[in-house]
Every structure is written in C-alpha cells, then in structure tokens.
Image: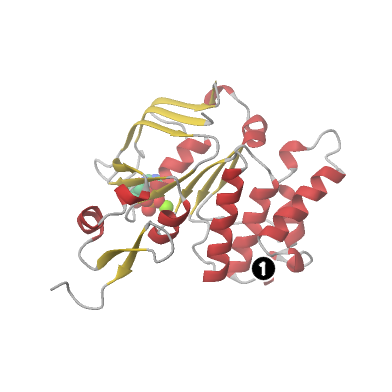
Amino acid sequence: MLLRLENVEFAYEVGPEAWSLRVASLTVKRGEVLSIIGPNGSGKSTLLRLAAGVIEPGQGRVWLGDILMTEMDRAAVARRLGYLPQHIRPQFDLRAGEIAALGRRPHLLGLGRLRRRDRTAVEAAMRATETLHLSERLLSQLSGGERRRVFLASVLAQEPRVLLLDEPTASLDLHHQVLFFRRLRGLADSGMGVMVVTHDLNLASLFSDRVVLLDRGRIRHRGPATDVVNAEIIKAVYGPELRVDKHPEIDRPIVLPRTAPPP
Ligand code: ADP
Ligand code: MG
C-alpha cells in the first residue's frame, strides 16, 4: 500500500453549509490506476488535497507508506508523492524546460545542481508529454494545453512512487489525452500508484483498475469500471442525458451523450 486515507473527515471553515468530505477508507496500491469521478463540487479536489498532505483532515489519518503524512516534512513527501493541482498560478514566468526541471528539486543535494540522472528524468518526462520542443519557450507564451503538458512533465520528472493528478487532461486535445492516459497506465504497470481525478468517464473506464465515484462528499460507488460505470449509476448521478455502451475493442463501458431524451 502506497497511500491510505483512514476515517478521514474534512469541512471547509467558510465553505458551503453542511458540506463535508467523509472517507472511511481509501488506498492507492502499487501498480494501479485509481480514477476519481463525480459531479462538480462532489469533493474530488478536496480528497486529492488531503491525500497530498496540502490540507489536513479535521479527523482521521493519511498514511504515506507506513508513515503518517503529518510526521513528514514536505521534501520527504515530495520524494515519494507527486501532486498536480487542478489550477496552478505560477509566480514567475519560467521557461518550459525550467518548469519540467523543477520536478527534480526534491531529489537534489547540496547546491541543487541537476546531475546526469536528473537530466535524463526531465528529458524522458518532456518526451512523454511531447513538450521537448517547447523547452526554451516562456510559460506565458504557451497555449493552455501546452502549459498543462509542461506541468505534467514536471510531475513526471519527479518520479514519485505515487502520483496524484487533478484533472490532468482537462485542457488537452484528444491526442494528448489518450497519450497521457496510456502513459499513466504504463507508469502503473511499472509499479507506480496513480490516483487521477477526471471528468472523462471513458478514459477512466478504459485505463483504470478501479473507479471511485464521489457524490456530495461521500464515496457512493467503487470498484472496476464495469461495475461503477453502468447505466443505472451514471443515470442516478449524472442524469438521463447519457447512455452507457461497450467499447468496440475491449470489454469496458463507455459513455455517450444522447442527442434526444431516451424513449
Ligand atoms: P470538485 O473537485 O469535486 O469539483 P471540490 O473538492 O473542489 O469539488 O469542492 C467541494 C466543495 O467544497 C464545493 O462545494 C466547493 O464549493 C467547496 N470548496 C472547495 N474549495 C473550497 C475552499 N477553499 N473554501 C471553501 N469551500 C471550498
Ligand atoms: Mg476539482
């Protein structure tokens, strides 16, 4: 087990009336892609922030391996855990290559110079996100999707054991969305644990081992995509505008928008 949330409860002090997140148990294991789905405001980002140790639960515990998150300093956390927030507002306008290299920071010693091993990791991450050609470009001069891919490169360069991603493919074109989820699958297959928040039910279905459906701060369903992404559940949570079908290549559910109300 790489990461575990145990009897976690959280409420924002100035948040919406009576909204809280409550999770009795949630683990991320080696080698798995765990997708978190759910409507807007269901608590997906809050769950990820708790798992990343960015906010602390009012009650309960978060374990990173066999150590309590609250007992680790940020650098120690960052050597094991990579976290990509939903929104990033960079304070400085850096070049894409510099952003990607920042991912190595938790691993650097002394003067903080990149060694050959660090440079290899950065280059591999930029290759995987197809951002190598953007290296010298300033962040402010990139498109939304290109910028997003540069941040993804940074968190991949970090080479953590567990990766938490909040809507990583939200502004990416379809090519880069599929490429990125395939990459996540590959990373998990080589031993990483991945927890990814996404609104794309199809990518969640096709590339993850388990799907967790959050609704109003509670886990309503969890299990393999074939169990969670089914017609009744999707209708109950997202409404009647969608239909659930089967992917033509593999035995996984896919979700399609209806053009007219169901008969
Ligand atoms: P999701 O990522 O599933 O869309 P969030 O976890 O961002 O949902 O938000 C869950 C609930 O908490 C929402 O009702 C949202 O309005 C509220 N919320 C999110 N962030 C804050 C914050 N920093 N302060 C107060 N309330 C917040
Ligand atoms: Mg969110």
Residue 95 visible within the image: yes
Residue 1 locus on image (x, y percent) = 51, 28
- Type of the residue with mark 1: Ser
| Label 1 Cα crowd, 10 Å radius (few <14 / some 14-19 / many 20+) | some
From the image, which quarter does the C terminus lie in? Answer: bottom left
Residue 4 locus on image (x, y percent) = 46, 29
Residue 161, relative to residue 229: is it above or below?
Answer: above
Q: Is residue 104 left or right of residue 177?
A: right
Which residue is pictured at 26% across the width and 66% down the height? 243
Q: Is residue 262 left or right of residue 109?
A: left
How many numbered marks have been drawn onto this rendered protein structure? 1
Residue 67 locus on image (x, y percent) = 56, 21
Front one among 172 and 246: 246
Q: Name which quarter of the figure residue 182 lies in.
A: bottom right
Q: Is residue 152 left or right of residue 47?
A: right
Q: Secondary structure at mark 1?
A: helix
Q: Which residue is mark 1?
A: 140
Taking the view exactly as shown, the residue that stands out farthest to the left is 263
Give the colour scheme of this rendering: secondary structure
Q: Is residue 19 left or right of residue 34?
A: left
Residue 94 visible within the image: no
Residue 33 locus on image (x, y percent) = 49, 45
Taking the view exactly as shown, the residue that stands out farthest to the bottom is 259
Which residue is pictured at 31% across the width and 54% down the height? 229
Mark 1 beta carbon near ligand 2 (under 8 Å): no
Which residue is pictured at 67% across the width and 33% down the height? 75
